[in-house]
Amino acid sequence: MDLMLDLDNWDCEADRLSFEDSPFEEDSLCSIGSESENVANNWRGWKRQNGGPNVGSNKERQVTPLAELSAKAVACYIPFEVVEHFPKPIPEPIQLRIAFWSFPESEEDIRLYSCLANGSADEFTKGENLYKSKCVKDTLQIGFHLSGTVSQNVAQGQSKGSFNVAVVFDRCRISSCTCTCASSAFWCSHVVALCLFRIHQAGSVCLRAPVSESLSRLHRDQLQKFAQYLISELPQQILPTAQQILDELLSSQETAMNTVCGAPDPTAGPSASEQTSWSLDESALHGNIKNTLVKFCIPSPIVFSDVNYLTASAPPAATEWQILLRSLRGREPEGMWNLLSIVREMFRRHDSNSVPLLEILTDEVLQCEQKGFAAICFTLYF
């Protein structure tokens, strides 16, 4: 319980930024229905329309033990490195519960970041269908590393096959995710399916302590056997790297590896000095925002029913302001307005990615070919 005394020192959400004092309210913005010619319907579905709770959230209320509450609080705010180096050794069962509660409990953030990476909720919907179709197999959580195999849903006409998915998390945030599929975005449907399985069926996931904790209990002969068995399982992939590590460890000269105490452990979470944040697919965001702006700024053809209009030419300033009013009244392009709403929601949740997302949005707006129009629209919203 002494570990809880350091809780305030490791609060990752100390900066309470909010838009509560903003002079712009939802009702004060001019808004009419989006026009039919809108071509940028991105970022739809980042919030459930019914606003209902997540599936499986209606659980019976039970009295939670104090040790479980403490493990949950530590998992949210304190890096695991502090737990490992705490003066009083933390029992391994408590360490396992800390690793258990370090995974996000709600699917709202999974849905949000999936929509940000893919520009729509399609990948999240596919991942939800994969989870409901029981396509997630062989789930294993080692410390703060979650892995599993996700097969395709043959019933929906998809090709057969399975993909290996890995997710790294810390302090209730997913910091990185990888998949062997050919998706260009980090948050593909297979990653979503694995995360939903871990959220709603956490009891079915095999839970193990970090690798460094397990290795510390092995004797010298057991460590040697472990290394040789590991190399023999994957000789082509591991053998060159293993020999390189051996050469550096046995070198008579000082190297970075044989002079530093300890060794990295990908399953033990980041170091205490690192700021954990949700995995934000910045490259996909840049591409989606750029495509949305380019589609909206391309001049649309104008059809005149009166021949006399052909001899009249409106000044360029009038055309520019006409497009500007169209954006403000109709909230076009819809994807940009939805993205600005996501930024405000992330500020409300005290998400550390709110500022980087706003920077990406500002950078793409300023780089747009129609700099004057886009910058004015962006400035007027805030």
Image (spheres, helix red, strand yellow):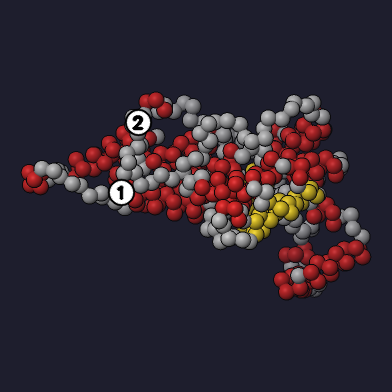
Is residue 374 visible in the rendered structure shown here? Answer: no
Q: How many marks?
A: 2
Q: Residue at x 73, y 51 (%)?
A: 139
Q: Which mark is residue 54?
A: none
Q: Which mark is residue 31?
A: 2
Q: CA distance from mark 1 to mark 2?
A: 20 Å
Question: What amino acid type should be assigned to the residue bearing mark 2?
Answer: Ser
User: Quadrant of the rendered structure where residue 79 is?
Assistant: top right
Left or right of 160 in this view: 297:
left
Q: Earlier in the sequence, mark 1 or mark 2?
A: 2
Camera-side residue of 10 and 73: 73
The quadrant in which the C terminus is found is top left
Residues tagged 1 and 2 counted as in contact (Cβ below 8 A): no
**Residue 310 horizontal side relative to residue 114, left or right:** left
Query: 102 or 78: which is nearer to us?
Result: 102
**Residue 153 image point, x, y percent:** 61, 53
Name the spot of residue 316 as percent of width and height, x first. 18, 45
For the question of whether residue 265 can be seen, the reply is yes
Circle 1 residue: 297
Image x and y of residue 170, in percent: 68, 45
Horizontal side of 323 relative to 222 (left or right) equals left
Residue appearing at x 54%, y 31% in the figure: 51
Task: Please tell me whether mark 1 sits on a helix, a strand or a loop.
Answer: helix
Residue type at mark 1 is Cys
* The N terminus: image quadrant: top right
Residue 236 or residue 355, whichever sits in front? 236
